[in-house]
Amino acid sequence: MASFNRVILMGNLTRDPEMRYLPSGLAVSDIGLAVNDRKRNASGDWVDEVTFVDITLWGRQAEIASEYLSKGSPLLVEGRLKLDTWETDGQKRSKLKVVGERIQMTGTRSGGGGSANDSGDSGGYSRSAPQNSSPRGRPQAPPNDEYDYGPPPGEDVPF
């Protein structure tokens, strides 16, 4: 039987990204995302329901998140569900989390000229794990990459 495991979430970071490197040198970043859902309760009032999701990013995605995002930053994440299981003091435990495969910073440019890390906002640039960069620090797409990285933060677009 076929299966499909794909998650798309949009929300705000609940904490600053927690970056670390494995002994192999691979970057790993853990982030928390708060996703809001608005519903009417029995009395007809609107109530916000928040879902908190733990997300793990790997490689260049982890480095980008650590460099450009901070608590409160709006973010779109695409990835897959993964069930982590472990044992503590003889009790089996498990947790459902998301392995983020693609992130997109969804903040809007507020005209300030500050860095993306200062404002928690990126101008909506999609970052999909570029493998190299040019002398000016612009991410360069690897061959056959389907994502457009746009201009780096801080450069104005002439339209």
Image (cartoon, rainbow, N blue to C red):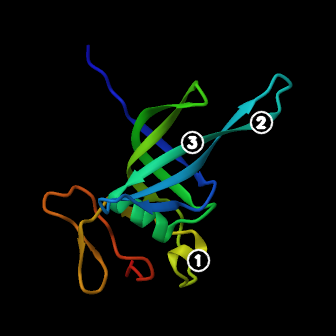
Q: Position of residue 99 (x, y in %)?
A: 41, 43
Q: Quadrant of the N terminus?
A: top left
Left or right? Give the position of 116 relative to 146: right
* Residue wearing tag 1: 118
Which residue position holds label 3?
A: 53
Residue type, numbered disc 3: Val
For label 3, count other residues whose C-alpha is less than 10 Å away and answer few (under 14), some (14-19) or many (20+).
some
Give the crowd class for mark 2: few <14, some 14-19, many >=20 residues within 10 Å: few
* Among the two numbered marks 3 and 2 on one chain, the one whose residue lies closer to the N terminus: 2
Choose top left, top right, bottom left or bottom right for residue 93.
top right
In the picture, measured across the screen, residue 150 lies left or right of residue 16, that is left
Q: Which numbered circle lies on residue 47?
A: 2
Instruction: In this rendered view, identify the residue nearer to me: 87 or 44.
Output: 87
Q: Residue at x 51, y 74 (%)?
A: 116
Quadrant (top left, top right, bottom left, bottom right) of the C terminus: bottom left
Q: Nearer the viewer, mark 3 or mark 1?
A: 3
Image quarter of residue 150: bottom left
Whether residues under marks 3 and 2 lie with C-beta atoms below 8 angstroms apart, the answer is no
Q: CA distance from mark 3 to mark 1?
A: 24 Å
Q: Amino acid at mark 1?
A: Asp
Q: CA distance from mark 1 to mark 2?
A: 31 Å
**Of the residues shown, which amino acid type is indicated by label 2?**
Val
Which residue lies at the image location 51% right of the left edge and 55% below the top edge? Answer: 75
Quarter residue 81 falls in: top left
Which is closer to the viewer, label 3 or label 2? Answer: 3
Mark 3 or mark 1: name the one nearer the start of the chain: 3
Looking at marks 1 and 2 on the same chain, the residue that comes earlier in the sequence is marked by: 2
